[in-house]
Structures are given as C-alpha cells and as structure tokens.
Amino acid sequence: MSTKQAYIIILRRRKRAFDILFNVGNESKTTTLLRLRGRRADVIFNTIISALSRYGAVSPLKTSEDEDVFAIREDLGPIIGGFLILLRRSTNPKKWLNLLNGTLEGRYPMLVTAFENCLTMAIDMSRIDKSHAKRRKYTMLTPRVLDAISAALKKLAETISKETS
C-alpha cells in the first residue's frame, strides 16, 4: 500500500470575504498548512484552478454554497503551496498570477525548485518556531516564518522573471 501525498485547495465563502486553505496529508487525513484571507481570495483561487485545469492537474472534490474543494495533482501540489506563500501579504496579487502561468508552462524552471524548496523550508522552520511560540493556535505554518519566506520569494521571483523575459 503506497502512501500517496494529497494536496487540497479550498475556497471558503464568508460574509464579506473569502478564505483559501491549502491542506496537505494523505487520502484519509489532511492538515491545513496555510490560509489566505481577503476580498480578492476568490480571484486568486479561480485563477489557480483555471491554470491547473489547463494541465488536468486539479479535480473537484466538493462544491457547495459555502466552499469549493479541489484536489491538486501530487507533482504540482508543492509548487502551488510555494506560490501561495509568495502571495501572502501581497498588496497586488494579480501581479503574481501571470507568474504562476509562466511557471506551469515551464518558462521559469528555477521557480519550480524555489516554490517546492520554500514550502519544505517553511514546514521545517515552523516546527522549530512552534516549539518556541507561546500561542499554538496557528495553522501548521507559523506567520513569522511565512512572512520571512514570502518576502524572500517575492524578491527571487522578480529577479528571475526579469532575467527570463
């Protein structure tokens, strides 16, 4: 029996805003790694789903008034996780959405590696950070770690996209 990694992306609708949840685990149980909130979260979610749909890399698990749940193909899950870290606290998320399309098309192979490695690094660093944190009410990835990695990813992505274009 193989332990297949499952990557789930969820859009939750709230009264005035939306939440994007990125979950990881196996077929039976997943853990929320990170959450993005805001009024533009639905645009981000729909763009990600649209981009992944072009490659047959996403499949719907549940659709209702309150939430949409999609499974992401195992090889692209870490890339989407890293991309969502990049989007954290972005004042202009639309700026980065074209970068996702270019990355999935293969224009930015270094970003594929960066997204995957940054997600892994965020998980490892958050484990250490959580053991020192006073509050343990976080998603798996701690805000302090996510903010630092997000800032670094933004600089790296800008540099790589300028050099390649």
Image: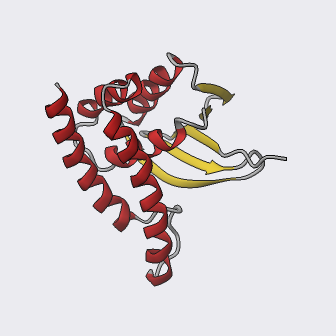
Q: Position of residue 89 (x, y in %)?
A: 29, 50
Indicate the colouring scheme. secondary structure
Residue at image location 57% in from the left, 54% down from the top: 32
Residue in the foreground of this view, choosing between 64 and 16? 64
Q: Position of residue 3 (x, y in %)?
A: 75, 49
User: In terms of image quadrants, where is residue 165?
Assistant: top left
Q: Is residue 72 above or below residue 23?
A: above
Residue at point 45% right, 40% down? 79
Q: Image point 52% across, 19% down: which residue? A: 55
The x, y position of residue 103, in whole percent, is: 36, 30
Q: Nearer the viewer, residue 152 or 135?
A: 152
- Viewer-nearest residue: 20 or 65: 20
Q: Is residue 149 above or below residue 84?
A: below
Q: Is residue 89 left or right of residue 120?
A: left
- Of residues 39 and 15, the one nearer the viewer is 39
Judge whether 72 appears above or below 139 on screen: above
